[in-house]
Image (cartoon, rainbow, N blue to C red):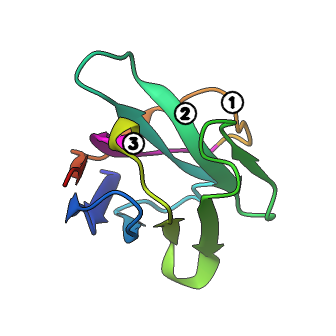
Amino acid sequence: QVQLVESGGGLVQPGGSLRLSCTASGMYFAINTLGWYRQGPRTERELVAAVTSGGSAAVADSVRGRFTIWRDNAKNTIYLQMNSLKPEDTAVYYCNGDEDYNLHVPGKYWGQGTQVTVSS
């Protein structure tokens, strides 16, 4: 059973930084695409960033230049460095993964989510 376990959420002031991590476990096959989606209090779930095992990445326009995603294949772990955080980044951030290589379509595996709150 595939498990995606997130960590790193919390409360931060505008302009601050947070780093999220997500580790995939429980599978005997490769999780070739891992990424982050988020859902705010009044928004639908949206892609934040995703990365394949080959290093290809997709980043949402709303976070480009502020957020960076990268992957440690040996640890089946992805990281999301979030800088210059804004109140509109407040959301539950979900880790997502799939065996397929598809950066723009949600995969079948989801983590439980971690809350990120940007507020003064």
Percent x, y for residue 83? Answer: 50, 65
Q: Residue at x 51, y 72 (%)?
A: 76
Percent x, y for residue 81? Answer: 51, 69
Nearest to N terminus: mark 2 or mark 1: 2
**Three-letter residue code for mark 1:** His
Q: Residue furthest bottom?
A: 74
Magenta stretch prevailing secondary structure: strand
64 vs 33, nearest the viewer: 64
Left or right: 105 as drawn, with respect to 42: right
Position above or below: 104 against 77:
above
Left or right: 49 as drawn, with respect to 8: right
Estimate the spatial distance between the alpha carbons at disc 2 and disc 1, rounded to whole Å: 8 Å
24 is within the stretch colored magenta = no
Position above or below: 62 against 14:
above
Residue that mark 3 sits on? 89
> What span is in magenta?
89-99
Q: Residue at x 60, y 46 (%)?
A: 63
Q: Residues within 10 Å of mark 3 (few under 14, many from 20)?
A: many
Percent x, y for residue 26? Answer: 34, 62
Position above or below: 66 against 58:
below
Residue that mark 2 sits on? 47
Q: Residue at x 40, y 70 (%)?
A: 17
Q: Residue at x 63, y 69 (%)?
A: 70
